[in-house]
Amino acid sequence: MTSYDYDLFVIGGGSGGVRSGRVAASLGKKVGIAEEFRYGGTCVIRGCVPKKLYVYASAFSTDFRDAEGFGWSVGETSFDWRKLVAAKDAEITRLEGLYQKGLANAGADIFHTRAELVGPNRIKLLSTGQIVTAERIVIAVGGRPAPHEALPGHELTITSNEVFDLPELPKSILIAGGGYIAVEFANILHGLGVETTLIYRGKEILSRFDRDMRQGLHKAMVEKGIHILCEDIIETISDAETGGRLVTTLKGETLTVDQVMLALGRVPNTQGLGLEAAGVKTDHQGAIIVDAFSRTSAPGVYALGDVTNRVQLTPVAIHEAMCFIETEYKGRPTSPDHDLIATAVFSQPEIGTVGLSEDEAAQTLSGVEIYRTEFRPMRATLSGRAEKTIMKLVVNGEDRKVVGAHILGPSAGEMAQLLGISLKAGVTKDDFDRTMAVHPTASEELVTMYAPSYRIRNGERV
């Protein structure tokens, strides 16, 4: 019987890697884990957590204005960027410590180094050159912002990695992209007082979301002063004579801004990882190819999270880690379930969504009922804010099952989590109809839309 240094060695200390390593160690397995940057991964260090903290910070500028409608005299306000950065740093350092403490308490060996595969069951720790062996290896190194090195002047730009820690808050910024990251940071930076422009090649931002969510958010962003240039792309970036960046676009626009941020997708972080040496196959984007149980082409090697490019969400990586544990260490083969994943865009207003969009349902179902409502949130009646909340249920006309739920408005992300449970359980529109409303709330609209706004038959609205 072959003897190994470790039962499990994890490469990558993010959400999926830490969860798989910690739980395996708690089950009595000898576990090693290596992280080359900071434990916590993208989500904790330079993703979801700091982003949400910055969302909160940026919302206060609107909260101060809203307060006047409720009788408050707020007075003069000011914002200190460096103080926010310092507070964020303290919080993510605390969280990183908790991640490492959990691993240590479970008995895992923690390494602060880059680790690379050098052959089947063999890992090299680059800080010392040590070679360790493991019966099973989990690769959970995540992804990184796409560099777009073909773009002239790309070296003058920043990404979501750098934006959290800029030495000074820019007065103006151009953000390239129309997905989660671009839209969220456009709202964050605008809320912090930055003149913000978004440029996106598509016809509408958030192309994978329901059309009402996309269009409603686009309108809200423009109304509050964010400039959005659709169906255009950056052609060149150079240093401006007056400082900052000079940008030209394909449509002939010329902009001078303090910073340019590229949010044009993310790529798996597999470069130089030694995958070939271990026989691990990747696709054309560099993502590790896995089967239904997260097994790679190499015996004993598994991959979790963004590095597989299945669904790039932190809870998905954690779920895949737990499925790995169930399959490999508890004798219960469990395949990750990527169906009906609720998600949120922390724009302002937020989007919360789960299931099929209207267009997706129209393409896959013979009959669809759409229940839609648009209204002014109660808070806005006194604050004077013009933003609208939009709620939408997509229902299969055959069996009345709710196949999609979409919300644009305050606390949409919180509502999407609960809707995700309902849709996962197979809730029907009749279940919504017989549920008592909680009044006065925005969410009560979800259970008081009794008549369909319109129907779709064989892809055509009727």
Image (cartoon, helix red, strand yellow):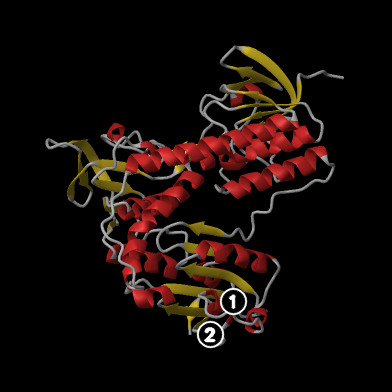
Residue highlighted by disc 2 = 452
| Secondary structure type for disc 1 | strand
Three-letter code for the amino acid on which mark 2 is drawn = Pro
Residue ID for mark 1: 395
Total labels drawn: 2
Q: Nearer the viewer, residue 307 or 110?
A: 110
Quarter of the image where one finds residue 6:
top right
Which of these two is toward me, 93 or 389?
A: 93
Q: Is 261 left, or right, of 238 in this rendering?
A: right
Residue 282 in view of the camera: no
Q: Position of residue 385 (x, y in %)?
A: 33, 71
Which amino acid, mark 1?
A: Val
Residue at 36 percent of width and 73 percent of height: 70
* Label 2 secondary element: loop
Compared with 166, 115 (above or below) is: above
The reply to whether dot 1 and dot 2 touch (C-beta < 8 Å) is yes
